[in-house]
Image (cartoon, grey):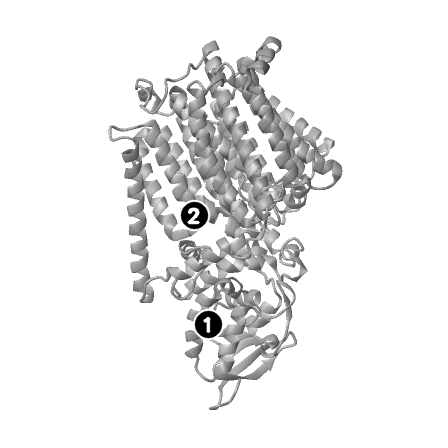
Amino acid sequence: MAEVRQPETLSRDRGKPPPPWAKPSLPHDGAGAEAHAGGLVSALALVVTVSAGAFAIASALLQIAVGRTEGAETALFLLAFGVLLPVSLAGLRLLARGGAGRLGPDVLPAVALASAFGLVVALGAARGWEALANRSGGPGLLLALMAGWILATVLASREPLLGALRARASWLWSPAGAWAPVAAAPLVIVIFFTASLPGAGSVLLSLLIGACLFGLHMLLRSTGLGRRAVLVVDALALALILLTVSDVWVYTTYSATQPNPELGGGALPGWLAQHHNAFLGPVNDVLHGRAMLVDTSSLYGVGNMYALAAVFSVVPIGYGTFGLLVAGTFAILYGLAYVILRLAGTSPLLAAAALAGAVISSIFYRIGASSTWPSIGPQRWWFSFVLILLAVLAARHSARARPLGIAMVALVALSSIWSFEAFVYCTATFAAIVGYDALVQPSKDGFITSMARPLGLAAAAVVAAQSAFALATVAVAGELPHWGTYIAFLREFSTGPQDSFRAPDWWPGLLFAGFFYVSAVSLAALLRYRHTFEVRNRAAMVAMVSLTAFGIVTFTYASRFSVNDAVHHLDLSAFMLGALWIHLAHQSGAAVPRVVRAGAAAMGFWLVGWFVVLGWDHLTKKVDHTPLVQLLPGHEPYIVQDLRHTWSSPPIDPRSVQADRLLDRFWPGQSRALVLINPELSVEALVRSDRINLLPVSDVFVEDFIREETADRVVPAIERIRPGTLMLTERFYLTPGARRDYLAANQPMLPLERVMIRHIRQRFRLKPILTTPSELMVVRLVPREAGQRA
């Protein structure tokens, strides 16, 4: 990829007057730029600080009133982005226009500085109390400290105090004072980032790594790279990303297919199968002629199951090949992120550093391997990232904006069939892109009309896509798709008891959410007050607007599953956004003091070093699983062997081989068999034997969450079973009151399993034909005589 050049739109935009919504553009160079930017930054610092304090107070009050619950966390998310964000934008507009009362442009820097550092002191004191006393200070202590912060902020705005400060610290009224609150960011990061405060050694090592990267960054900025050198660096960076992110064999090793204490304890038989079966079960049904939302369903969408079925009509279906597909698409997604950053204007080093931090955090630092989590990966995010790529390309090449816009509309329509999550994330990203375009390139019809047209076109495309899907389903299955089943899945997994992960008092997720919040407020300020700057950096700005919207809407996942690992699944967009902010700081000229520009870059590279230190143990344990290490000289070349091993999808549960043999023996040449065995074993056995269950249940474990809707489909199927039919089962299902170790120790049947076996036994007696040492059984369904009880 060549060095990024300026978008083609700039030569035409420079001669145009600013749009009507924009205030007169601030100077781009010189002392005037510093003064104007100082006032704007002071207003930003003050509204962000007040928003953070209001959020902390609301959080403490909610914990005191109702405790830490999922409902409280949802309410806080809505408060932050539904109430505080628009209020902050209104406050920013008020302060930037001259302030209210005494808070004029000449006073804002001092008050913003006092408020920002007062808030940091309040939060730091609460965290310090917890660390020293080895106990939680609780929401009461936080509330008391917030009251002190409010008092300090009010006092700081009083004229007597301001007059005294003016006499002794005139720098508070200078641009340096305006930017001073930014220095509080590292302290906030240290306060929130880990469950326990970091050790001095870790901090020093991260500073050393960051300093080395920062030094290289400054050197390259001064010397530059030639076009060929940039192409080489980009190629190497992409190769490193692809070879590091794609994991070729960890998902088929013993450790990946055995119970994991971190995921359900020691009673979960094969935690890889637990996450893969929700995909492989429905896809196996589709490969054998069943239609989605008619004969089978999936928690994770509709269109993606058909896409996977298309892949597995060419590639052998199995856990190994599916793991390869997941790992490969992960690598492509991160490579796409690097391409977006480079097209948006960031330097190769800055883009590579951002991706390095993201890879360590969201690939190596997470629980398990990336290929274990197909549900929280490219199948959920890739629509939005492709959308952002197309928007950046449209910003760089206005002549191609129309066909690229049509492609974006098509992506939104396709995502509506793919999965609900992909549709929500893609639509939010598209709306942000459309809103940005309507703001920066307003037409004579006005902002609302400019937005309504592409959004209306997208809505029409969604309706057309859904209609085409419905007609195709009728043609294949003879009936319309039953969206109620999928809606039941969404309802259960949005509000059900499995959403029991609640955020601790000091949760890194707040840091990421806060970063997206600050980014949204800051972008609004740039769009309103820096029209000329926006024109010069349109590709970067559209990437930042879309990434901010995408980050906010995807954070709904982290707010529902408020554990640290969930944040690591979502932080790629945050790293990209950080790199783009550093890039914009360097593009700002004298409007941002040189020390601030350097400080922003230094802090960004320090964060990369911080993630390297935090994730080093995880990195060293997992890096051997990557093609990058296996291809290095001197390393044993297991990669070919591992790929062959993976391609053959070796058994996870050894009993699946025995079940496969039984199915071949008693159901020769048949594509369907009546199977009621352990849910994990059932999916694996059916996939290996190239059969589907006679009962329309693709994955009993997942469909048990919506057992009522599933029963409406299963019970009629049981009524159609012919006498004399054979069934593959286990002794467990024939023993009243039997218990097993599944999901937890000493558990009974799943409720859906009880429904199925009860209806089968109401019609038939189960006559054993064969029993294996592993307690797998083949039984014949014999009709019950009239009046005979089950």
Which element is circle 2 on? helix
Residue at the farthest top position = 167
Where on the picture, by quarter, is residue 254?
A: bottom right
Residue at the farthest right position = 133
Which element is circle 1 on? loop
How many neighbours does mark 2 have within 10 angstroms: few (below 14), some (14-19), or many (20 or more)? Answer: many
Q: Is residue 93 above or below residue 133?
A: above
Residue 2 relative to residue 218: left or right = left
Residue 55 visible somewhere in the drawing: yes
Q: Position of residue 382 (x, y in %)?
A: 45, 44
The residue drawn where x is 48% and y is 76% is: 668
Residue at the farthest left position = 444
Which of these two is toward me, 453 or 708?
708
Which of these two is toward me, 201 or 223?
201
Q: Position of residue 313 (x, y in %)?
A: 43, 59
Tell me the tag on residue 400: none
Q: Position of residue 317 (x, y in %)?
A: 49, 60
The first of marks 1 and 2 along the sequence is 2
- Which residue is the site of mark 2? 422
Residue 603 visible somewhere in the drawing: no
- Which residue is the site of mark 1? 695
Where on the picture, by quarter, is residue 359?
A: top right
Q: Is residue 552 above or below residue 221?
A: below
Which of these two is toward me, 575 or 490?
490
How many neighbours does mark 1 have within 10 angstroms: few (below 14), some (14-19), or many (20 or more)? Answer: many
Q: Position of residue 135 (x, y in %)?
A: 72, 42
The residue drawn where x is 40% and y is 32% is: 392
Amino acid type, callout 1: Leu
Residue 651 relative to residue 475: left or right = right
Residue at the farthest bottom position = 786
Q: CA distance from mark 1 to mark 2?
A: 29 Å
